[in-house]
């Protein structure tokens, strides 16, 4: 299977994630959360939702910077970044407070956003990033979650409606319908298997 990011970078990031999990409590979102569900593409950066107690612990260990434009805190390391999203400050499709309290589960010892919340977050990221390199990775992750994590699409629909983003269901359909077949290796699929999954999921999305 083709790797989207350089393997040395993803290995460093994974090791960093394991260290971080021993230092603070958090809910994992982003690419590494997607990987834990799908075992497809590893991530370059680490994205977490944490509370202010965890942020204070990080301030004692790392050099933190505040990104007011993107409403997050950042730790910039040599090979990868750690992005920290906080209740009452960060703006995500699913609010950080709700992720911390309601929308997470456990996978391989990590607290991870539920499949529905993760898909909603990825749709929000894809909407913001467009056709950038990270936007292309978002589209791969979106379909990876859809095909391999098996989110409840009725729950997803209700979640998007509750948070004022019902149009993201259309974005999900267009991402699936217009996916670049040159990127199928990132999903570990051939054209025939992808076509079957595409047809089934489009039918389900149109019926909910």
Image (cartoon, grey):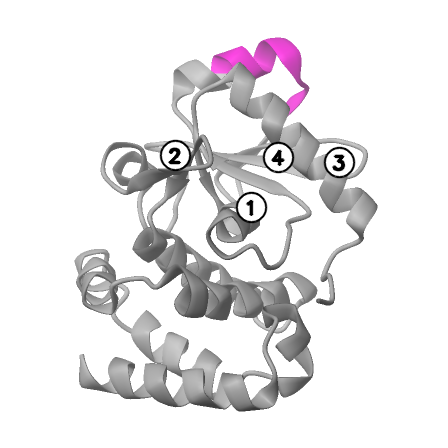
Label 2: element kind: loop
Q: Which mark is in front, 2 or 3?
A: 3
Q: Residues within 10 Å of mark 1 (few under 14, many from 20)?
A: many
Instruction: Provide residue 197's location: percent of width, then percent of height.
Output: 42, 82
User: In the image, is 13 to the left or to the right of 159?
Assistant: right
> Is 59 colored magenta in this rendering?
yes
Numbered circle sitting on residue 32 = 1
Viewer-side residue, 43 vs 126 = 43
Q: Nearer the viewer, mark 4 or mark 3?
A: 3
Work out whether residue 127 can be spotted: no
Question: Quick one: label 3 or label 1, which is nearer the N terminus?
Answer: 3
User: Which residue corresponds to the image point at 31% horizontal and 74% vertical from the top-left?
Assistant: 169
Question: What separation in Å lies between label 2 and label 3 (alpha carbons)?
Answer: 29 Å
Do the numbered discs 4 and 2 sit on residues whose CB atoms are within 8 Å?
A: no
Name the mark on residue 89: 2
The residue drawn where x is 49% and y is 36% is 48
Quadrant, the C terminus: bottom left
Region rendered in magenta: 56-64
Where is residue 134? Give x, y as percent. Answer: 64, 61
**Secondary structure found at label 3:** helix
Give the residue pinned by disc 4.
82
């Amino acid at each position: 299977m083709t790797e989207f990011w350089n393997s040395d970078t993803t290995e460093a990031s994974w090791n960093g994630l394991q260290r971080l999990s021993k230092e603070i409590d958090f809910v994992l979102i982003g690419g590494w959360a997607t990987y834990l569900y799908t075992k497809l593409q590893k991530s370059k950066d680490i994205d977490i939702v944490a509370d202010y107690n965890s942020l204070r612990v990080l301030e004692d260990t790392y050099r933190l910077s505040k990104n007011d434009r993107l409403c997050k805190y950042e730790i910039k390391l040599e090979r990868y970044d750690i992005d920290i999203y906080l209740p009452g400050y960060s703006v995500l499709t699913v609010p950080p407070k709700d992720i911390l309290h309601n929308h997470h589960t456990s996978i391989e010892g990590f607290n991870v956003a539920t499949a529905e919340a993760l898909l909603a977050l990825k749709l929000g990221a894809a909407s913001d990033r467009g056709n950038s390199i990270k936007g292309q990775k978002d589209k791969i992750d979106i379909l990876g979650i859809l095909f391999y994590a098996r989110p409840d699409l009725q729950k997803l629909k209700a979640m998007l409606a509750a948070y004022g983003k019902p149009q993201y269901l259309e974005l999900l359909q267009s991402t699936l319908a217009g996916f670049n077949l040159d990127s199928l290796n990132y999903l570990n699929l051939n054209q025939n298997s992808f076509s079957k999954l595409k047809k089934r999921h489009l039918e389900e999305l149109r019926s909910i």
